[in-house]
Image (cartoon, rainbow, N blue to C red):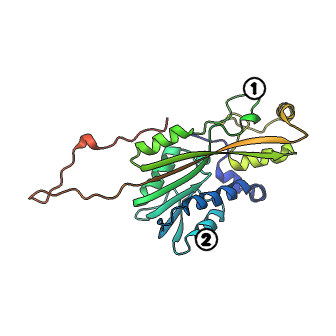
Amino acid sequence: MSVSIPRALLHKNPDCLAEHLFLHHEIAERMLSYLAENPNFKPTQILEMGRIDDALKACCQATYPDAAFDVLDYEAQLPLRADLVISNLFLQDAPNIETAIATMKDHLNPNGKIFMSTVGLESFANCIMPDGPEFNDYPDIKRLGDYLHSQGFIDVIVHVEKITLQYNQLDAILKDLRVAGGRVARPLMKGLRTRAWYESWAKHMDKAKTDDIYDIEIEILYAHAQMPPLRAASLNQDNEAHFDIKHLKHRKRFE
């Protein structure tokens, strides 16, 4: 799954990035508040996938002050492993959701937990012009849950939150959408948006505003799952372990 605005491009515009990360910060706090509801979960090593700033790290260290914290990327080499791999609003920017989740899974200890948040399928729906292209191709809640199950995770829990943001300026909306992973054009559309395009979109948005206020709806998906415990295969009298290949899982594509 490809996206139109990679993280690398956002980091080339640090002022815009710093001023419009409020949604990432809010969701980071919510994620750690959810984790803190389980007092028995005390990770000793935490890895963050898709780091965009230090907000999630600060929340993790405040909740789990004794845990070591590191950043995980696609080039990370084993045996770097953790009890918790966490990812905040990253999947919508990931070049490939399968690869991102597989990377996180590869660095989890047995019984380790994965916790992700991502922009959901119904986000920014009221920003789309009726005759415009499909707005995004984010995963929906069922697809994400089914995919985690197919990868061998247990205790999979996926839930959704609907957030409504209010604006009085269209320029601020566009900047926030850019940082949050929103799109108002085809995912693979290239080139700059024209003045005519902007004026057409502005007219569309003006029809829906109330008292000069624009309401923007965002769907946030949270996905929490656990690696199964490590079970040693029994040995025969020759100290050999045998596995039934019929029980081996095939990797499922995210479709």
Q: Residue at x 54, y 58 (%)?
A: 86
Q: Nearer the viewer, residue 29 or 18?
A: 29
Q: Residue furthest bottom?
A: 66
Q: Nearer the viewer, residue 185 or 149?
A: 149
Determine crowd level at label 1: few under 14, some 14-19, many 20+ residues with C-alpha closer than 10 A: few
Q: Quadrant of the N terminus?
A: top right
Vertical placement of residue 4 versus 69, above or below: above
Specify the amino acid type for callout 1. Pro
Residue 70 location, x and y as percent?
A: 53, 67
Q: Residue furthest right?
A: 211
Residue 143 location, x and y as percent?
A: 51, 38
Q: Residue furthest top?
A: 131
Q: Residue at x 25, y 40 (%)?
A: 246
Q: Nearer the viewer, residue 175 or 74?
A: 175
Q: Residue at x 80, y 41 (%)?
A: 215
Nearest to N terminus: mark 2 or mark 1: 2
Q: Which residue is mark 1?
A: 130
**Which secondary structure, mark 2?**
helix
Specify the amino acid type for callout 2. Ala
Q: Which mark is residue 230?
A: none
Residue 61 location, x and y as percent?
A: 59, 70
Q: Which mark is residue 62?
A: 2
Determine crowd level at label 2: few under 14, some 14-19, many 20+ residues with C-alpha closer than 10 A: few
Asked if marks 2 and 1 touch (Cβ < 8 Å), the reply is no
**Which secondary structure, mark 1?**
loop
Location of residue 120 (image quadrant): top right
Q: Residue at x 66, y 64 (%)?
A: 55
Q: CA distance from mark 2 to mark 1?
A: 45 Å
Location of residue 136 (image quadrant): top right
